[in-house]
Image: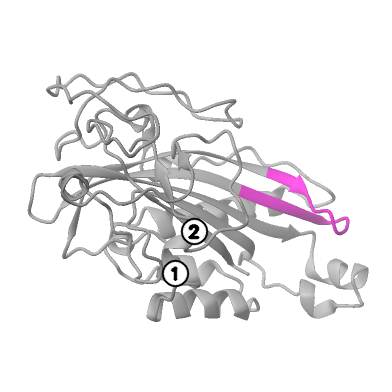
Amino acid sequence: MLTAAALAAVAVNPSAALSWLPGGLGGGGTEASGAEPSPLAPGTARPTGAPGEAPEDVPTRERPFAGSPAARWESGEDAVRLPGAKAVNGVPADRIEDALRGTKEFRVSASLDPAVLKGAEPGKALALVDPLRTDCLAELRAALRKPTEDNDPVTTITRFDPGKIDLVGEVRVRGRRTVAPGKEAEGRAVITADHTFVYGVARAGGDETTRVIVRRVLRVLRVLRVLRVLRVDAADPARYQGTEGRLRIRDVRGETGDDDCQDGDGPINPSFLSDLRTAPPSPAGEARDPYDRSQGLSRSGGPDECGVVTRT
């Protein structure tokens, strides 16, 4: 499967005191000071825990990341950094570098392209998927054309309804990529891209602002060359055919913080503080910190795994 399942989380605004959240969140927002926090150095390894609490503040259109750890993160596509490429498991460095660049292009198209964020088709991302992986392409195209509960495009592609949501500020990004030997045979390497994207969003035409936090883990297979892999795995040659210059995607896992937990409608639907004050959702599932990148994402998931985020 291209997509595993997305975990949608009902957001809790950190400046609101909502009694149904375990432990509660208290305090009011402070006035925006205009001071920008010092940026973090790029991440190179998995962190050992969640980031510390940011100075409490209320997000605005002018400062959508106020009160968030993402205020210190890098922004835009330059934040999707390329690690140095080296040979892995018999796959030469130039092929590894090609796959790393392809995963970045896929990431940028699927998670950062302004037109895609507003609902346009992610043509660049689709063009990068190996056409021989007809199951992946068919699943993605079907999700974009007619989303369902079991096949929602937001597991792989970030989309908002521009009639309801305005994107504010440049997307903040934190993540890393790793290259590991493929376990099945020599001459195979797996590139894993693990990134968290934080989007500032406001009601269309209004001032109320919040954030959406999306973490996605993308795994891509790279082989030494097609003929060698076919010889090694002659019992099932179709399994290892591939198109040069395209990505053989193994799987994508996603987790979205501040969604309405309604899988299958296509876009991400964030909750604003006024929504939670008038009709706070019942807690479902465990409470999670969407900024905590110290743990991997589960391969399970689905509409019954809607949790509660502890901050946005």
Q: Is residue 131 visible?
A: no
The quarter of the rendered structure image containing the N terminus is bottom right
Which residue is under mark 1? 152
- Magenta residues span 179-192
Going 24% across and 64% down the picture, which residue do you hit?
161
Residue 250 percent location from the top left of the image: 66, 63
Q: Residue at x 14, y 36 (%)?
A: 62
Helix, strand or loop at label 1? It is loop
The one of 194 and 261 positioned closer to us in this rendering: 261
The amino acid marked with disc number 1 is Asp
* Residue 185, percent from left and from top: 88, 58
Estimate how packed mark 1 is, as few (under 14), some (14 to 19) or many (20 or more) residues with alpha carbons within 10 Å.
Answer: many
Q: What residue is drawn where x is 64% and y is 76%?
A: 133
Q: Earlier in the sequence, mark 2 or mark 1?
A: 2
Look at the picture and state if 96 lies above or below 73: below
Q: Amino acid at mark 2?
A: Ala
Q: Nearer the viewer, residue 60 or 170?
A: 60
Is residue 89 magenta-colored? no
The secondary structure type at the circle numbered 2 is: strand
The tag on residue 6 is 2
- Quadrant position of residue 28: top left
**Position of residue 153 measured from the top left corner of the image (x, y, whole percent):** 43, 68
Tell me whether circle 2 and circle 1 mark residues in contact (CB < 8 Å). yes
Q: CA distance from mark 2 to mark 1?
A: 8 Å
Frontmost residue, 43 versus 98? 43
Mark identifier at residue 141: none
In the image, residue 148 lies at what x, y percent?
A: 43, 76
- Asked which quadrant contains residue 306, the reply is bottom left
Residue 190 is one of the magenta-drawn residues:
yes
